[in-house]
Image (tube, grey):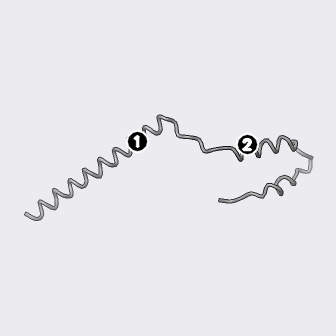
Amino acid sequence: METIDLSSAKETTCPCGRIITQEEYDALISELAQEQEPELPNQLSEVLEKIRRLEFNMMILVGLIMVVFILCQSS
């Protein structure tokens, strides 16, 4: 992950002057530091759980089909 040097970013200003004040800048930086990853909505987590269950059932089905093929070849 790339790190950003905040001190050098603070010193750079555009030729037309400052766009935001120092207080606004500090408030924005503190909000960015506190920002957390958003949690998955409840509905999305339910969908992911159903997909995991479907994957598991498909693995069991493929295993049973392989067993049938192995038994058919040996006889």
Q: Nearer the viewer, residue 72 or 2?
A: 2
Q: Is residue 40 left or right of residue 16?
A: left
Q: Residues within 10 Å of mark 1 (few under 14, many from 20)?
A: few
Q: Which mark is on residue 31?
A: 2
Q: Nearer the viewer, residue 65 or 49?
A: 49
Q: Residue at x 16, y 62 (%)?
A: 70
| Quadrant of the rendering where the N terminus is positioned | bottom right
How many C-alpha atoms fall within 10 Å of the one at disc 2: few (<14), some, or many (≥20)? Answer: few
Name the amino acid, label 1: Glu
Quarter of the figure with residue 28:
top right
In the rendered view, would you say 30 is above or below 6? above
Q: Amino acid at mark 2?
A: Glu
Residue 31 image position (x, y, % from top left): 73, 42
Q: Which residue bears the numbered disc 1?
A: 49
Q: Earlier in the sequence, mark 2 or mark 1?
A: 2
Is 23 situated left or right of 73 in this image?
Answer: right
Residue 17 x %, y %:
92, 46
In the rendered image, the vertical position of residue 38 relative to residue 2, given as above or below: above
Residue drawn where x is 63% and y is 44% of the image: 36
Instruction: Indicate the secondary structure of the residue bearing disc 2.
Output: helix
* Figure quadrant of residue 67: bottom left
Dots 2, 1 in contact, CB < 8 A = no
List x then y, in percent, for residue 69: 16, 59
For the C terminus, which image quadrant? bottom left
